[in-house]
Image: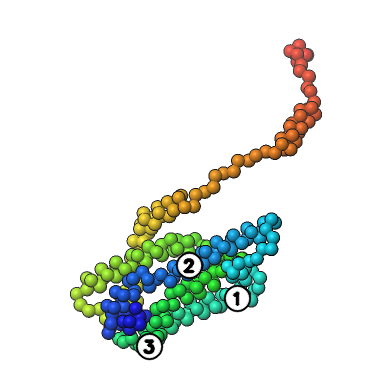
Amino acid sequence: MTAKYDLGIMLTLDNPADFMGLTYLKPWSRFSSYGVGGIIGFMYFEYKRDQKASANPEIQNYQASFASKVFLAPKISTLMTYGYFIVGLFMMTFLVFIQYDFYKHQLMINPWSKFSNMLFNGFSRALFVLGLTFIILPTFNNRLTWIKVFLGSDFMVVMGRLTFAVYLMHIPWMIFFFADLRQGYWMSNLSGWTLVLSTVPISFLFAIPFSMYAEVPFMNLEKYFLMPKPAPKKETVSEFKKIEAHERINFTKDSEEKIPMLSDKEMQQ
């Protein structure tokens, strides 16, 4: 799409409709992000399976898979732990700030070459998620625990529950805002921040009931049907424990001192 229609990484005034209609609003523009997440999920599943296999004494000549080597590398070496973190942070930071070279022209023209636009539109989202994965991977082996504590905090749990709903809510509100304008809206740094600071609180406000009445029920259904809780295990008492308990009871009864009962006349005396 980028090569055929000479699209940029964001809409520009010389060609705004093609970018929004062919790239930004289409599902394939975000498919790579979910694809990377799916691949990491399969790798984690294989890593957990390898852990069970390595702990089984019946399996001989066990060889770790590529997924296990990727997940265990931070555990083996502290250098690999910080290497993962630095590489991931660099990838995410580079993909965010490289866009300034595009936006500094105030979206009047498409300043990048066709090849540069192709690289960014084709790989930026996947590489951003991959960079985030490199940062999170060490936490699976109790490395960089401050990241695990931060991402597992109550605030981040609530934000994680609301972010998708906020993503869905912000688009309709921006459409309502621009559709209701009676004159042209000049986009500048100040007007852009004004739009953001007004849209974000409204999106969060409407995301809360949307998440409670739409997302949470379906998440509960998913847990009920796809991830049911295992039945509680019945505790079975071995024959040895039964015999031991029986002997303990008999010993206690036999060792008790018999207290003679007094008659009424003896009690009166």
Q: How many marks?
A: 3
Q: Which image quarter is the N terminus in?
A: bottom left
Question: Could you tell me if residue 164 is visible in this image?
Answer: yes
Q: Is residue 240 above or below residue 152?
A: above
Q: Going 31% across and 75% down the picture, which residue do you hit?
A: 22
Residue 248, disc: none
Question: Could you tell me if residue 8 is visible in this image?
Answer: no
Residue 137 lies left or right of residue 192; in this view the side is right
Q: Is residue 22 above or below residue 233?
A: below
Q: Which image quarter is the C terminus in?
A: top right
Would you call the spot at circle 3 few (<14 residues within 10 Å), some (14-19), or many (20 or more)?
few
Q: Position of residue 5 (x, y in %)?
A: 31, 81
Q: Is residue 21 above or below residue 56?
A: below
Residue 196 lies left or right of residue 149; in this view the side is left
Which label sits in the foreground, 3 or 1?
3
Circle 2 sits in a helix, a strand or a loop, which is it?
Answer: helix
The residue labelled by disc 1 is: 82
Q: How far apart, in angstroms, are the residues tagged by discs 3 and 1?
A: 35 Å
Q: Residue furthest front?
A: 61
Where on the picture, by quarter, is residue 103?
Answer: bottom left
Q: Going 37% across and 62% down the picture, which residue do you hit?
A: 165
Q: Foreground residue, 9 or 102?
A: 9
Circle 3 sits in a helix, a strand or a loop, which is it?
Answer: loop
Q: Going 37% across and 88% down the picture, which residue do you hit?
A: 113
The residue labelled by disc 2 is: 37
Residue 147 lies left or right of residue 187; in this view the side is right
Q: Foreground residue, 144 or 111?
A: 111
